[in-house]
Amino acid sequence: MNPLSSIISTLLFLFFLLPCSLLLADETLQGCFQDQLGSSSQEIVHTPNTDFYSSLFQLSIRNLRFASSSTSGPLLIVAPTNETHIQASIICCKKHGTQVRVRSGGHDFEGLSYTSADPFVLIDLSRLNSVSIDIEDGTPWAQAGATLGEVYYSIAEESSTLGFPAGYCHTVGVGGHLSGGGVGNMMRKYGLAADNILDAKMIDVNVRILDRIAMGEYPFWALRGGGGSSFGVIIFSWKIKLVPVPNTVTICNIAKNREEGATDLVYKWQNIASQIHENIYLAVTIQAANATDDQMTIRASFRALALWGANETLPVIHNHFPELGLEPKHCTEMGWIQSRLLYAGLPVGSPTKVLLDRSSPSGKGFLYNIQYLSGWQDSGEVKRKMRWVRKLYKYMTPYVSKFPRGQYINTKDLDLGKNDPVKPSYTEARVWGEKYFGANFRRLALVKDKIDPENFFRNEQIKHPTSSTGSVWYCC
Ligand SMILES: Cc1cc2nc3c(=O)[nH]c(=O)nc-3n(C[C@H](O)[C@H](O)[C@H](O)COP(=O)(O)OP(=O)(O)OC[C@H]3O[C@@H](n4cnc5c(N)ncnc54)[C@H](O)[C@@H]3O)c2cc1C
């Protein structure tokens, strides 16, 4: 026998010696995970017939419209505890042509982090939630599955004069929130949460783990406001910049009904709220309220957070907005971390540990961000309430940004449009993409071209590679 045929016959012999189970296992998606992860696969990968599957799936469904039995669950849920588990997920899903959805805190308005019309694997990052606040070293890191509450709590454990400028609700995940911008009540002074990210670790479609230097400045720019998984990456952790906060901040609350001049106050508010000193964030909530037991009215509730004590805050607000009639009785001084509780709707004075509880439920140049909210208890109300919100949205058209009308990516809206499931196109995606990102949309799509040209990471509104238009441009 010549040497070549001897090698071939030896290889064939070895091939037949491979255990049948291994060959068969890899033919299925689940088997691929077993091959990749070995015995740890049982703890990390959950199938619909395991006990943990259902509770893990429901755990971070924050939009209860999707908590019903009509929502189809994923083929598998992967609950990684380190990078290699995420890499294995990408390898197996690519191999088996299965879609991936990535969920950190699960607050996606349209449930796109855990629903899909196609069969999918859910990568649930809730176990990757460590936060390390090393102030002396100056390098705080938060894993993508951590919540804002966990970040705020960890900071407060280390210092009462440092904070992080991000959103209100403590259960929001930093994976989705920071990658979509992150609007909060210190943004007038410090910008969005995404403006305070110094570095990030992400895993791309080729399972490379990249930090800021390795990924380059364009992808790093896209990650901070371009909207999570859209770029064909999974964010693993963020390095965040803490900002100085005073020992005492001031919160003021005052509400006026229509009969007390609420309409004029809102009118005045929109002219001064963006002009006042940057230490003061003054927001308004407009909602239906009871005027008397049998009469409804409209109420405007104004709330200010000031990075000052009350003595400095009151004269400044009074100077700009005397009609509001703000008095010392409307204001309370507290530590920054207590103000986090208040904005999260938790009782002030509660132990800050409540911020760790997960069980309760971008753009520059915009002066205001409006949220239209409607709630209901009875599922029979869905259609009527949704109709009402859509009507209000339409009614507001003349009064808000135009050409295009802006929309914040962290409050996704599928009413703006969806990709054609068969033939998605860049031109089509521009319709909603430019609403979210304005002129930056094209630049973001170009980053997507580079990072995920095969569009492995996709969802109903994801940016499509621009190459279909025949023009690819990239610069640094
Ligand atoms: C009750 C509530 C309060 C809110 N308050 C605020 C607020 O104060 N300020 C504000 O700006 N926004 C707020 N939001 C909006 C919130 O910031 C966005 O919904 C944000 O995307 C949620 O992030 P998440 O990780 O919790 O959500 P998820 O549903 O887990 O993710 C949202 C999107 O990001 C993607 N994604 C998540 N994690 C990763 C990851 N690790 N890598 C890649 N992609 C990922 C998901 O696939 C999905 O597309 C609020 C939302 C809710 C429901």
Image: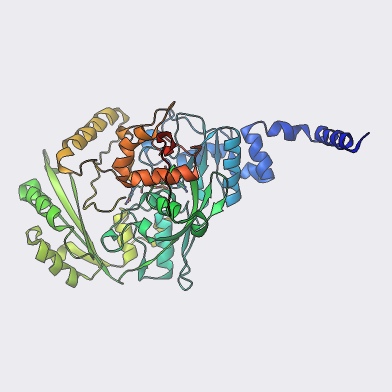
Tell whether 41 sits left or right of 176: right
- In the picture, measured across the screen, residue 198 lies left or right of residue 430, that is right
In the picture provided, is 117 more to the left or to the right than 19? left
Residue 373: percent from left, percent from top: 25, 41
Q: Nearer the viewer, residue 229 or 346?
A: 229
**On screen, 129 above or below 311?**
above
Quadrant of residue 386 within the rendered picture: top left
Q: Is residue 44 left or right of residue 408?
A: right
Rendered residue at 59%/32% (across/down): 96
| Front-lying residue, 132 or 288 | 132
**Quadrant of the drawing holding the N terminus:** top right
| Rendered position, 150 above or below 113 | below
All told, the count of numbered labels is: 0
Locate residue 118, reporting x and y percent: 48, 29
The x and y percentages for residue 208 are 57, 50
Quadrant of the frame with the C terminus: bottom left
